[in-house]
Amino acid sequence: MPANNSDARQVLREWIRSKAPSVDEATFTDQTKIIEEGLITSVDVLELFLLIEELGEIEIDATELEPDMLESIDRICQTFLE
Amino acid sequence: MASDSDGDTIFNLNEVDGLQVTQDKQAVLGGAVLGLAQDIDRLFAHWAQQFGAEERQFSPLVSAAQLNKLEYFKSFPHQVMFPVSLLPDDDNLNAFADDPISSDDALRLTETSPVHQCLAPAACFPVYMSMSGQDLPGTCFVTLRSTCFRKEESLTPLERQTAFTMREVVCVGAQGDVQEYLEQFKQIVVGFFERLSLPVVLERATDPFFNAPTNRKYIMQKVAPLKHEMVYDGHLAIGSINFHQSSFGETFDISCQGSEVFSGCVAFGIERWLFAFLGHFGTDTDSWPGFEDLVAG
């Protein structure tokens, strides 16, 4: 069963923290631009895809990706998990 | 003939002063068009100087082992080219020398030596490779011009050549410095295109990855604004602005003042800039801008 939105957000936050341990907790929000601000890199992006697929019980077609779909936790949830 | 995105002829290559085209569709530059190419490159060097970039010159041969660290062969096996030599065995060399070429002008290679290098597919890779294992004292800027080589399915002189000239201006250092540099360069080139009324726009882009949907770098370019191309007349990328995040720093173990290093580059294809200039200003040399016109403003 897909994770509910609140749980999914929490899982995503924890995953991003694990990739960017030095993230500034004071400014890290669901609107933080996680790629633009360097919290995740291309090394992490496939893992993020798998995580989103697992959370949403969906399959993502990479060819249909649009710019900024992974911009922030808010955007990920709006695009894939709602 | 050179055509625009609709296939309409925009200028005749034969009418360009100093331009010749070889049988393999490579442009040969001389006379006025060579002067224009040199002026265009001086413009790039002028922009590079604004950032205090150090000029460097590298070999056009790049270590295959180093390229492999970048997963280049996984990403671009369809484009990479190699400098190949024959196994230095007398029988092998004699066999080649006796019958070196076929009727369709393809070499009949006999046994070849192990290949440890590639022809440079982009100018900037050797910059990061040369910094391998270093802790930089601060953010640094490097500019270089190289002949680059890519296998292409179809060739068009100036527009798409197997060998072409690339000028790059590279920034390696703190994340904020690299991102600010790329933003400043965007403003420089956009201002230049507007001032000369060149029909070039910045567009988000992806590289032509092999097996793209399964390549993490392609996915990253699809979802993040890491690469922008300077697109002339809606169809020809004459340059690009690229943010690599920390990928080169991690691959080559580079740091900056003990911290994670980021990088970005601005790349210009000189033959393609010539194409854009000839398409826009025409083949009459009197209508071409001089160097002072290019750097004015």
Image (cartoon, coloured by chain):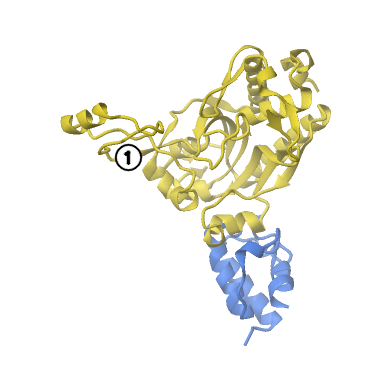
Left or right for A30, reference B20 = right
Give A29 or B235, whichever is nearer the viewer: B235
Left or right for B165, reference B278 = left
Disc 1: which chain?
A: B
Q: Quadrant of residue B239?
A: top right
Instruction: Indicate the position of residue B108 as horizontal and vertical percent values.
Output: 32, 35
Residue furthest to the bottom in view is A1
At label 1, the amino acid type is: Val
* Label 1 SS: loop
Q: Where is mark 1, residue-wise?
A: B115
Give B237 or A39, whichever is nearer the viewer: B237
- Residue at (27, 38) in percent of width and height: B112
Q: Which chain is painted in yellow?
A: B
Q: Quadrant of the N terminus of chain B?
A: top right
The answer to whether any part of residue B293 appears in the image is yes
- Residue at (37, 44) in percent of width and height: B65
Residue furthest to the front in view is B103
Left or right for B146, reference B238 = left
Find chain A in the image and tell me its colour. Answer: blue
Instruction: Indicate the position of residue A82 as horizontal and vertical percent values.
Output: 73, 78
Left or right for B108, reference B222 = left
Q: Mark 1: few, some, or many residues within 10 Å (few <14, many ≥20)?
A: few
- Residue at (81, 23) in percent of width and height: B297
Instruction: Indicate the position of residue B227 as horizontal and vertical percent values.
Output: 65, 47
